[in-house]
Amino acid sequence: MSAVWVYAVTDRDAPLDVPGVRDEPVRAVRHGTLTAAVSSVPLDEFGREPLHRNLSDLAWLEPVARAHHAVVTRVAERGPVVPLRLASVYRDDAGVAALLAERADDLTTALGRVTGCTEWGVKAYAPPAPPPAEVATEGSPGARYLAQRRAERTARERVRHSAVDLADRVDRTLRPLATAYRRHDDRQAWPAESAAPVLTASYLVADDRRAAFTDAVAGLAATDRVDLTGPWPPYSFAGLDET
């Protein structure tokens, strides 16, 4: 017996020339102007209980996630796309068609929001923290200890201020070039580790502003460590959870 794995929804013809999960062929389920890209998967591996177990197995999950992403990306090459969350499994094609019917307004709105846009990921990293300033060696051991702790605290505060300034500067530069944005970082965690990014954000960028956006990132990267990934399907801006 089999179930139906759903990759994405679009208002264009879904491409059928890319293999899906477990190399199963991708097919289309349609309702009105909406099309879902789907494929069949075996229930003994993708039913509720085995799927719950398998999602905790990284060796199992990695090829499944790669196949899911490959189909979503291929659909996005044709036009706007609403990617579904990994492991969106339905009993049959009728269940997928019901999804399209029930969420038609939300899906149509989401597709309109991301038409002509792609997602870009940006991470910014503060420079490594300098060593704390040396403290005077005079005084009692207790006084030297307290002075050293003050110096370390001052150094941490400098790193934190630097992180805040860099994250805000990058975001202020890029946000006006994007149609929408989402910050994923947690300021309360700064600076937990010098290697951790101080900004992790996703930007939805119109295709006609792509060059301006990537040039702006390059300008920032000339003086600070700012990493750019993309373009991606609009995972952060068009999922069903967003609607």
Image: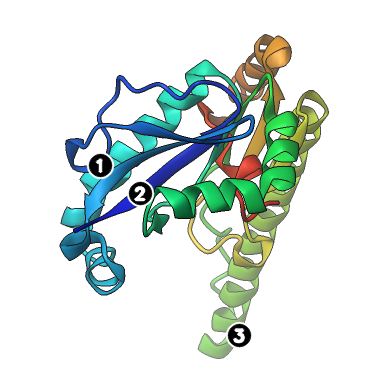
Q: Residues within 10 Å of mark 3 (few under 14, many from 20)?
A: few
Camera-side residue: 34 or 170? 34
Distance of mark 3 from mark 2, alpha carbons?
Answer: 66 Å
Mark 2: which amino acid?
Trp
Camera-side residue: 194 or 51? 51
Name the residue that disc number 3 marks.
143
Q: Residues within 10 Å of mark 2 (few under 14, many from 20)?
A: many
Q: Is residue 210 above or below residue 38?
A: above
Examine the image and state in which quarter residue 109 appears: top right
If you read the primary sequence from the N terminus, does the residue marked by circle 1 or circle 3 appear first?
A: 1
**Mark 2, mark 1: which one is toward the viewer?**
2
Q: What is the x, y in percent for residue 37?
A: 43, 35
Distance of mark 1 from mark 3, alpha carbons?
Answer: 64 Å
Examine the image and state in which quarter residue 236 appears: top right
Q: Which residue is found at the position 51% from the left and 25% from the top?
A: 76
Q: Is residue 40 above or below residue 213?
A: below
Element at badge 2?
strand
Q: What is the x, y in percent for residue 64?
A: 26, 46
Examine the image and state in which quarter residue 61 appears: bottom left
**Marking on residue 120:** none
Q: What is the x, y in percent for residue 41?
A: 24, 50
Q: Residues within 10 Å of mark 1 (few under 14, many from 20)?
A: many
Residue 85 in view here: no
Name the residue that disc number 1 marks.
21
